[in-house]
Image (cartoon, rainbow, N blue to C red):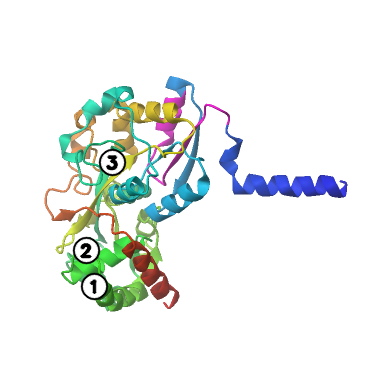
Amino acid sequence: MSYSTQLRFVAGALLALAAPVAARAAGDLNLFGWSEYVPQTVIDGFTKATGIKVNFETYSSNEELISKLVAGGGRYDLVQPSDYAAEVMIRQKLLAPLDKTKLANLKNLSADFTGRPHDPAGAFTVPYMAGSVGIVVNTEKVKVPVTSYREVFQAQFQNRIVVLNDNREIVSWALKSLGLPINTITADSLAKARPVVANWVKLVKVFDSDSPKTALLNGDVDLGIVWSGEAAILWNQHKKFRYVIPAEGAHQFIDVLAIPANAKNKAAAHQFINYILRPEVSKLISAAFPYTNPNAEARKLLRADELANPASYPKEGKLETFRDIGRMASDIDRLVTDLKSAK
Ligand code: N2P
């Protein structure tokens, strides 16, 4: 290989590494979604129904989504933020308004999940799935009741705990356990949360937002704080895994689909949103990832045992959604990153 060929080869390899999706063909849909959330069968079904190829990339937190979207320069056609992240993105003008004439299946959604504060008129977002963040306990290993955040983070459970690898989450649990608000964050409330979080991170064995169920299933840990859909899968595997909404109250999320303002293929993005709103498609999402389905028509198609799963459809518990907290979000990030590196 000549020197200049080698250079071209290296440059090409670097470009491929930096931008795997750049190889898209015109007309493809570039979907950027949470890991373990969009079944491949649904993506394949969409391609079969429309002829549109989907390039799928995943992320593990809202913060990762926003930073990659901002850096991506029009790389993504469809994203899947949580409510509060969508609120941030709307404020920062990162989202395109939806053309509702292309979304006939919006009528299938339950009114319980629309008209929420992050996007009151539904101008930018469409609910995908909802859920909560709660405690899961392997009751064969943990014989004492665990019903609150404080009861999870006890010295007796050191190195037996899995939690989400999510800074906003862990700080909110600490704030809740102190009786402080999770959406009005001040320097003072963070100073109070800091020693609590410092203590807690030392007790955790595994931080995992992608598949926290795995450490519980393979017996690496005995309890944790996880997304409700993960707990629902554990319950389906074995009834020894119990889901509990923490007594202090838990975070409820509504994750949505939204189209970036600089998306190149907004038409395909609308088609995908309308496709997942079909009841028979939405039902497949629930079967693979048993979160709380916001699609009223899809719910009618779920089996009784799916609707009876206590993690997917909890009967009681205080739930509160996150809101855009502006610049305090980076203070939270810094706090947890510091404490984890000191662990
Ligand atoms: C899917 C996680 C979705 C819940 N793995 C986050 N809001």
- Tag on residue 61? none
Q: In the rendered structure, which disc, 2 or 1, sits on the residue that comes first in sequence?
A: 2
For label 1, the crowd category at 10 Å Cα-Cα, with few meaning under 14, some 14 to 19 and many 20 or more, is some
Q: Which residue is mark 3?
A: 129
Q: Which residues are magenta?
A: 25-47
Of all residues, the one furthest to the left in this rendering is 316
Query: Would you say residue 158 is visible in this rendering?
Result: no
Residue at mark 3 to residue at mark 1: CA–CA distance: 31 Å
Residue at 25%, 42% in the rendered image: 119
- Amino acid type at circle 3 is Met
Element carrying mark 1: helix
Q: Is residue 143 above or below residue 56?
A: below
Name the residue nearer the viewer: 295 or 138: 295
Name the residue nearer the viewer: 82 or 199: 82
Q: Which residue is mark 1?
A: 189
- Tag in front: 3 or 2: 2
Q: Which residue is mark 2?
A: 184
| Residue 115, image x, y percentages | 19, 39
Q: Are marks 3 and 1 in contact (CB under 8 Å)?
A: no
Element carrying mark 2: loop
Answer left or right for 75 relative to 241: right
